[in-house]
Structures are given as structure tokens and as C-alpha cells.
């Protein structure tokens, strides 16, 4: 590696396993750095320099990039994101999949289309994330010579990050799908997740390295980043910013029609089975608004998230460990008063057990509505009257919380005494355990949701969960065969074209 520095004085550092080493210091114009598998993991420059350039003598030809960006009812995000990508020299086409039907008549987007010919608008009914990405991937596959970037409409990726991802991919000796670390848009130095994998045993996402929680990297330097060291290989990357090498879609097909969640993980598992590698590059970044546990687990999304997890576990031949994992989490949901989450999960389990022929692909236009109806009905039966004031703002100590939860489940219902206020970011089984009622609040302290936790509902939810998981265990091998057989039929261009046609016909 050749390092060229303008200005100075400068210091060139290297680091491995958390230990830094001074490579050179002073006025440095050119420096040769040897890259070896067991050599430094990091090189970086400190000092009053004007510019730094890193280069190698390896010849590489970078392909053009097609961006696929689904969007729905987030017009400002869609315009800003499309313009960002349109201004990048390495991007030759931006496919905007509008599933809200609002961009065609938006003056700001019309101006964008007029000023940037590389931007193309495709409008269709809301078929979820998988439907939006599938439509864009189908269009992008018409040019097999282009790499394809999948991006959310509110996930900010710099051109430099994309250039690094593209370069790494072009130099890789095996076909490699490249992702980027996920940072918080609200707190740009906070790393939300780096490299992940689907654990085959519990069939859940987990880190492949030593990163166990979000981390604020402000004031840190490469020697502090030892958590990135890989403990196992990634088998998927999140579609907030994933780059496919040219020809991937023609080789692997389109996403599974899951509406939301697990389409990216399933595609990664499929790619792994076909000999693709996965890499998440340090030195790149996607900045995305952070998710909250409340938004993920206590809204309609929880239903499809859990259903799809079980479906993909079955399709890929997972053992019954995923059933045990599901049951243990359901018990925690019940004890902690997350009875809406338990209800949504149970409905997802019922859909999964009904088999792929009853819903896969056919539910795309009503998956969100189905979940919303469950949520509204549950809140109608469990919401507290407004206004309700909290009696405490800190969680109970664990022994006391567990005892309170068990006693409430065993006793007859009574008016809530311990009304706990919890910020939406902090909603977790541990933080609400033991409360008779929960107030979920936002940054301003306003109540987002207020619901009771009744013992009779806890008992009913626990009985239902035990029955459903026993049924899952009994049917598991049969379900594995059915979903493994069905999945390949639903990822072809013909299958998706039929879904697009049916959705357009139904809309008209």
C-alpha cells in the first residue's frame, strides 16, 4: 500500500489487537506499507495534513451501481435520498419504488426527475419491504453488468463509503455481498450494529464479534475497536445498505414474499448456500434513525417478524431450538406484561402453522392491515383511561419484580396500583416486569401508550402459548418440508410478476 500525505508534520500509526504502534513521524510525502494477514489491522494518520491518499498497484475495474430504494409516504426522505444518490458519480441509475402513490404528483420529485435523468420512478401498491425491493431488483437485473445497492429511503450512505464497498467487492476473490456498519442518525457516533449472522440453533440474529450492545465511538481510535474482531462468519447483511456484485439477482433470484422482516436474512442464507461470502466493512457507515423495542415489538410489525422468523427457520431445516427460543420469549412477554406482543406472536404462529399455501405471497396487500386490526382490538380492551398518572418511574428490583408478576398472574384481577412509566427506547421485559400497568412515553414525556396488565389475561396468554408451541413441535418436520418445497416457487421473476399484476388489478 502506498500512502501519500500532503502537509504535516504527521504521524502514521498502526494497531493490532488493541495495541498501537508508531510507524513513522514528521514530514512524510510517501510511505510504503506492507499488508499481511497477520500484520496490523489498522493504519491511520494523525496531524495537520491537507490530504491523505491510499493506493495499491492492483488493477481493478469498478462496475456501475444501480440503487434500489423502496419508499412509502416519506416524501421528504425519498426526495433527499434520491438526490444524494443521483449526485454520486459511481451511481448510474436510481430506482425509486413508490408504494404510497404520492411521489408522481409531488412537485419536488418532478423537479428531481427533470434534473437527474438517472432517477427513475416506479409506482405500485404497498407490497411491503420485500415487494418494494423485489420490484427494484427485478428492474435492476435487466443490467447484469451493474452492482446493485439496496437502501432504505432514510438510510444515509456517503459516496466514499459506497466507493470503498464497491472496491472491496471488485477485489474479492469470491463473489461477496458487502454491507456497512449501522450508526444512529440521532447520535452519529453511536454504532448500533456491525457484522451479524443468523444463529442456526435459535434462528435469531446475533453479532458475529464481541459487540453485545450499541457503542458510542466518540473519542475512540482504532486500538479501542477490538470488539470488531470476528468470532464467526457472517451469513447475511441488513438491507439498510447492502451491495450485490453484478449478476447476483440473476444467479439467486428475488426475495421471499414476506412483506416485512427476514427477507434480507433469508436472501443472505440463500447466497451463503450458493457460495457467496458476506462482508461488513469497517471504515464505511450507514446512518439510520434508530429503532425502539416498543416500535418493533408492540406494533403490527411483531406479527410478521415472528411469523417470518419461524417460516425461514423451517424452510432452512432448523431444529426445534427455534421453538424453545420462541416459547421462552413468550413466557417473558407474559410475565412482563407485553401481552400485545404475545398476541401478535401467537397470530403469527397460527399463520405459519396453516402452511405456505394459505398466505405466502397472497397476504402482501393486507399483511399490515391484519396486524393493525389486532393491535386496535387489543388496545380497545386493555388501554387505561386518559389521563393516567404513573406511580413510579423506575423498574422494580428483579426479585421483587418476578414475585409481583407471578402473584398477579395467579390472583384475581384488581385495579392497577403500580403504574410504571417507561420511555419507548427502554421498553424491555426486564424494565416492565412487575408493573400492574405501563405508560410508554416519548422524548417529551408524553404518553404514547397506556395499558393494564391483568392476571386473567396473563393466564390466558400463557395457556395459548403452551398449546401453540406444543403444536409447533409436533408439526415441525412436516412444516419444514412444506416451506422448503414452497419457497423456491415464490422467488422467481414469474412468481413476482404475477403478484405485481394481481396487485395492480386489485388497485384499479
Image (cartoon, grey):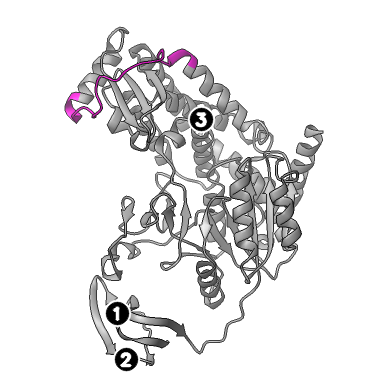
The one of 493 and 296 positioned closer to us in this rendering: 296
The image shows residue 215, relative to residue 105, as above or below, that is below
Residue stretch in magenta: 380-400
Q: Decide whether residue 287 is among the magenta residues.
A: no
Tell me what residue is drawn at x 30 percent, y 17 percent.
436
Query: Residue tagged by mark 2?
Result: 27
| Side of 271 relative to 501 (left or right) | left
Residue hosting label 3:
349
Question: Could you tell me residue 507's position as x and y percent?
Answer: 78, 33
Residue on which the image places disc 1? 14
Crowd class of label 1 (few under 14; some 14 to 19; many from 20; radius 10 Å): many
One can see residue 120 in this view: no
Compute the Cα span from label 1 to label 2.
17 Å
Task: Mark 1 vs mark 3: give the one in front.
Answer: 1
Could you say which quadrant of the image residue 271 lies in?
Answer: bottom right
Q: List x then y, in percent, for residue 448.
A: 43, 27
The quadrant in which residue 328 appears is top left
Q: Nearer the viewer, mark 2 or mark 3?
A: 2
- Residue 418: give x, y in percent of width and height: 26, 17
Whichever of callouts 1 and 2 sits on the residue coming sooner in the sequence is 1
Q: Secondary structure at mark 2?
A: loop
Image location (x, y in percent) of residue 141: 71, 61
Q: Is residue 121 left or right of residue 405?
A: right
Q: Determine the residue positioned at 36% across, 83% down.
A: 36
Secondary structure at numbered mark 1:
strand
Q: Which residue occupies the foreground of this view, 24 or 349?
A: 24
Mark 3, other Cα within 10 Å: few <14 / some 14–19 / many ≥20 = many
Q: Quadrant of residue 341?
A: top left
Q: Earlier in the sequence, mark 2 or mark 3?
A: 2
Judge by depth and name the residue closer to the eye, 373 or 266.
373
Q: CA distance from mark 1 to mark 3?
A: 51 Å
Q: Where does the N terminus fall, quadrant-wise?
A: bottom left
Amino acid at each position: 500500500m502506498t500512502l501519500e500525505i500532503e502537509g504535516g508534520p504527521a504521524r502514521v500509526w498502526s494497531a493490532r489487537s488493541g495495541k498501537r504502534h508508531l510507524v513513522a513521524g514528521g514530514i512524510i510525502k510517501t510511505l510504503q506499507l506492507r499488508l499481511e494477514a497477520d500484520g496490523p489491522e489498522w493504519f491511520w494518520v494523525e496531524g495537520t495534513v491537507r490530504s491523505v491518499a491510499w493506493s495499491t498497484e492492483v488493477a481493478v475495474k469498478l462496475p456501475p451501481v444501480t440503487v434500489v430504494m423502496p419508499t412509502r409516504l416519506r416524501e421528504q426522505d425519498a426526495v433527499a435520498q434520491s438526490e444524494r444518490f443521483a449526485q454520486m458519480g459511481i451511481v448510474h441509475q436510481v430506482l425509486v419504488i413508490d408504494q404510497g402513490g404520492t411521489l408522481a404528483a409531488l412537485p419536488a420529485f418532478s423537479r428531481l426527475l427533470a434534473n437527474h435523468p438517472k432517477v427513475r420512478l416506479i409506482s405500485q401498491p404497498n407490497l411491503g419491504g420485500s415487494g418494494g425491493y423485489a420490484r427494484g431488483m427485478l428492474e435492476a437485473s435487466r443490467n447484469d453488468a451493474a452492482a446493485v445497492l439496496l437502501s432504505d429511503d432514510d438510510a444515509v450512505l456517503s459516496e466514499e463509503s459506497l466507493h470503498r464497498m464497491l472496491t472491496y467487492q471488485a477485489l474479492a476473490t469470491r463473489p461477496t455481498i458487502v454491507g456497512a456498519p449501522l450508526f444512529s442518525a440521532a447520535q452519529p457516533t453511536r454504532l448500533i450494529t456491525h457484522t451479524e449472522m443468523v444463529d442456526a440453533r435459535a434462528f435469531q440474529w446475533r453479532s458475529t464479534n464481541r459487540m453485545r450492545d450499541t457503542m458510542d465511538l466518540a473519542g475512540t481510535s482504532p486500538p479501542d475497536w477490538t470488539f470488531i474482531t470476528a468470532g464467526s462468519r457472517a451469513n447475511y447483511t441488513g438491507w439498510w445498505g447492502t451491495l450485490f456484485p453484478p449478476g447476483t439477482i440473476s444467479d439467486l433470484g428475488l426475495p421471499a414474499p414476506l412483506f416485512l422482516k427476514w427477507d434480507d436474512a433469508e436472501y443472505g442464507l440463500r447466497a451463503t448456500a450458493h457460495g457467496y461470502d458476506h462482508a461488513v466493512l469497517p471504515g464505511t457507515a450507514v446512518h439510520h434513525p434508530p429503532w425502539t423495542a416498543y416500535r418493533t415489538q408492540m406494533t403490527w410489525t411483531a406479527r410478521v417478524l415472528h411469523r417470518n422468523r419461524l417460516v425461514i427457520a423451517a424452510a432452512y431445516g432448523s431444529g426445534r431450538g427455534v421453538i424453545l427460543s420462541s416459547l421462552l420469549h413468550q413466557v417473558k412477554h407474559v410475565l412482563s406484561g407485553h401481552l400485545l406482543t404475545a398476541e401478535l406472536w401467537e397470530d403469527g404462529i397460527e399463520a405459519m402453522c396453516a402452511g405456505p399455501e394459505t398466505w405466502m405471497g397472497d397476504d402482501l396487500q393486507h399483511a399490515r392491515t391484519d396486524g393493525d386490526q389486532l393491535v386496535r382490538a387489543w388496545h380497545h380492551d386493555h388501554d387505561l383511561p386518559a389521563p393516567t398518572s404513573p406511580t413510579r418511574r423506575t423498574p422494580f428490583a428483579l426479585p421483587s419484580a418476578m414475585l409481583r408478576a407471578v402473584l398477579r398472574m395467579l390472583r384475581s384481577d384488581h385495579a392497577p396500583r403500580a403504574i410504571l412509566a417507561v420511555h419507548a427506547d427502554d421498553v424491555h421485559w426486564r424494565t416492565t416486569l412487575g408493573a400492574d400497568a405501563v405508560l410508554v412515553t416519548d422524548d417529551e414525556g408524553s404518553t404514547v401508550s397506556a395499558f393494564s396488565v391483568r392476571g386473567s389475561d396473563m393466564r390466558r396468554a400463557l395457556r395459548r402459548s403452551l398449546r401453540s408451541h406444543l403444536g409447533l413441535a409436533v408439526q415441525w418436520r412436516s412444516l419444514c418440508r412444506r416451506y422448503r418445497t414452497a419457497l423456491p416457487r415464490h422467488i422467481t421473476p414469474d412468481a413476482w410478476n404475477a403478484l405485481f399484476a394481481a396487485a395492480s388489478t386489485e388497485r384499479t
